[in-house]
Each structure stands twice: as C-alpha cells, then as structure tokens.
Image (tube, rainbow, N blue to C red):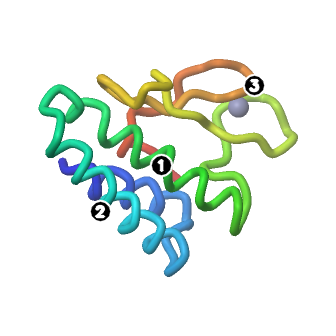
C-alpha cells in the first residue's frame, strides 16, 4: 500500500477522517514526496513520517490521534509511531504501556 492509503486507512478506522485530517495528510504527502524524491533511502521512512505529520497537525487542531484502546489505562492517551525515525516497518505503539498495537495501516475500530 502507498503511504497515503496506510494513513488514510488508520484515519478512517478511528473515525478521524474528515476535511481537517485529510488536508493535513495531503499537505504532508506533498512535502514528503519531494523529500523522498531527493533521497532514495528515505523511502522506507516516508509512511511513518507522514503519519507523524498528521498526528502533529491534528494535535494542534483537534487533539491527540490516534487514541489507544489496546491497554488497561483508562485515561485517554495516544499511540506513537515506532521507530521514531518513521521506519522501516512503522508500527503504532501505546505511549503509556509501550505495547505494540498495530502496524501503520492496521488500526481497527
Ligand atoms: Zn495504551
């Protein structure tokens, strides 16, 4: 799957796909596509970096995304992309418990 499809899937799976998040995704795609075109080795990081960009944009405008539903901690808290560099093999990890929740593009409701 492409980076766009992976991130869009996770936005949809968490009911967070709306004009705000999709435009954040498109803005990031434009930037990162250029970046990846300059650096062949960077391609493995692009999807994770785009997910982080969308996360940052949503944090400013809407709030934390995606929220963790995987662990026992009841207070709302977010997932983050591991590894922090964005790849290879970007994965959503709970920021509280550190458990691996799903690969990027693999979130479920
Ligand atoms: Zn958690």
* Sequence-first tag of 3 and 2: 2
- Residue at point 47% right, 60% down? 11
Where does residue 27 sit, x and y in percent of width and height?
39, 66
Q: Quadrant of residue 91?
A: top left
Determine which residue is flagged by label 1.
Answer: 108
- Residue at point 17% right, 26% down? 41
| Alpha-carbon span between mark 3 and mark 2 | 32 Å
The number of discs equals: 3
Q: For mark 2, give the secondary structure.
A: helix
| Alpha-carbon span between mark 2 and mark 1 | 26 Å
Q: For mark 3, give the secondary structure.
A: loop
Ligand 1 within 8 Å of disc 3? The answer is yes
- Residue at point 50% right, 25% down? 84
Determine which residue is flagged by label 2.
Answer: 30
Where does residue 4 sit, x and y in percent of width and height?
29, 57
- Residue at point 55% right, 58% down? 14
Seen in the picture, residue 30 relative to 68 is either above or below; the reply is below
**What number is the disc on residue 96?**
3
Q: Is residue 80 left or right of residue 63?
A: left
């Amino acid at each position: 799957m492409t980076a766009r499809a992976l991130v869009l899937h996770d936005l949809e799976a968490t009911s967070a796909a709306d004009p705000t998040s999709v435009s954040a995704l498109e803005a990031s795609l434009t930037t990162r596509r250029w970046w990846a075109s300059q650096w062949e080795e960077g391609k493995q990081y692009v999807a994770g970096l785009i997910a982080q960009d969308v996360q940052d944009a949503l944090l400013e405008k809407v709030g934390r995304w995606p929220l963790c539903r995987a662990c026992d901690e009841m207070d709302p808290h977010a997932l983050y992309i591991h590894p922090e560099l964005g790849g290879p093999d970007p994965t959503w990890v709970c920021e509280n418990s550190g458990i691996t929740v799903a690969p990027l593009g693999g979130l479920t409701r």
